[in-house]
Amino acid sequence: AQSVTQPDIHITVSEGASLELRCNYSYGATPYLFWYVQSPGQGLQLLLKYFSGDTLVQGIKGFEAEFKRSQSSFNLRKPSVHWSDAAEYFCVVGGTSYGKLTFGQGTILTVHP
Amino acid sequence: DTAVSQTPKYLVTQMGNDKSIKCEQNLGHDTMYWYKQDSKKFLKIMFSYNNKELIINETVPNRFSPKSPDKAHLNLHINSLELGDSAVYFCASSQEVAGSYEQYFGPGTRLTVT
């Protein structure tokens, strides 16, 4: 069975600081990995995805994530956080079973001015 | 243009009532989904349809019945609503890309059962 763990429930950073959100997954084969963001009262927006190839993937809004098979991790990073990045972030693992996605429990990001 | 739309956005109703949530996608995708997000923000898949055929049916009470009149629509009907059904329900759609299904989500429907 596939599973996702986001160890940090809530992270607070100052605007302009760097950010790393952690994600560990469990999956029997090569996983398909995603990061989604949910702003308050909004739906989910896809930030980036990893299917295969280069293990460092670039996404929208200046985010990137690195797939590390040896550590079963797919951490999300951003070099300089903006106040508008405050939201909840979900790490997601999926396979080929018609898109059955498993979501992590989410990390709430608060950005201080 | 809204890619995945849901109606209504908010739904407040009493226990025991029957209600429906509608979802439409204009992306031409073959697969559509319903997810439930509980009060702790945990998202869990409920159903998935591919070309109007049910392919994923997680452990969901029989009171929940999805209906797909065509591949652009996936509606969710809920009978005999209970307090525990209060949640945000998200519709999503996807198309296979290199063996994976990148999903696009609707804005959600916040259901409150009183």
Image (tube, coloured by chain):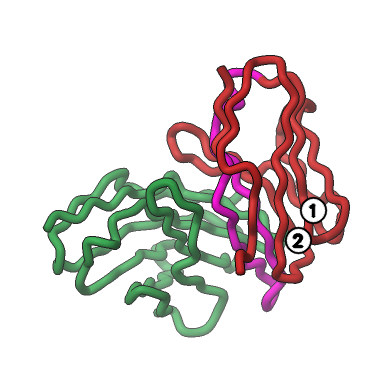
Chain colours: A green, B red
Quarter location, residue B112: top right
User: Which disc is residue B64 wearing?
Assistant: none
| Looking at the image, residue A101 lies above or below residue B113 | below
| Looking at the image, residue B9 lies above or below residue A23 | above
User: Which disc is residue B49 wearing?
Assistant: 1
Provide the residue designation for mark 2. B31
Residue type pointed to by label 1: Tyr
Residue A53 among magenta residues: no
Residue at 56% over, 74% down: A51
| Residues packed near mark 2 inside 10 Å, few (<14), some (14 to 19) or many (20 plus) | many
Secondary structure type for disc 2: strand
Residue at 72% over, 45% down: B22
Residue B88 among magenta residues: yes
Q: Which of B57 and B86 is in front in this view?
A: B86
The picture places residue B84, in percent across and down from the top left corner, at 58, 22
Q: In this view, does A106 lie to the left or right of A30?
A: left
Answer whether residue B44 is visible to the viewer in this image.
Answer: no
Residue type pointed to by label 2: Thr
Q: Is residue A22 left or right of residue B44?
A: left
CB of mark 2 within 8 Å of CB of mark 1?
Answer: yes
Q: In which quarter of the image is the C terminus of chain A?
A: bottom left
- Earlier in the chain: of badge 2 and badge 1, it is 2
The picture places residue B45, in percent across and down from the top left corner, at 64, 45
| Looking at the image, residue A65 lies above or below residue B59 | below
Q: Which of A41 and B50 is in front in this view?
A: A41
The picture places residue B43, in percent across and down from the top left corner, at 53, 43
> What's the magenta region?
B82-109
The picture places residue A14, in percent across and down from the top left corner, at 13, 59
Residue at 56% over, 47% down: B108
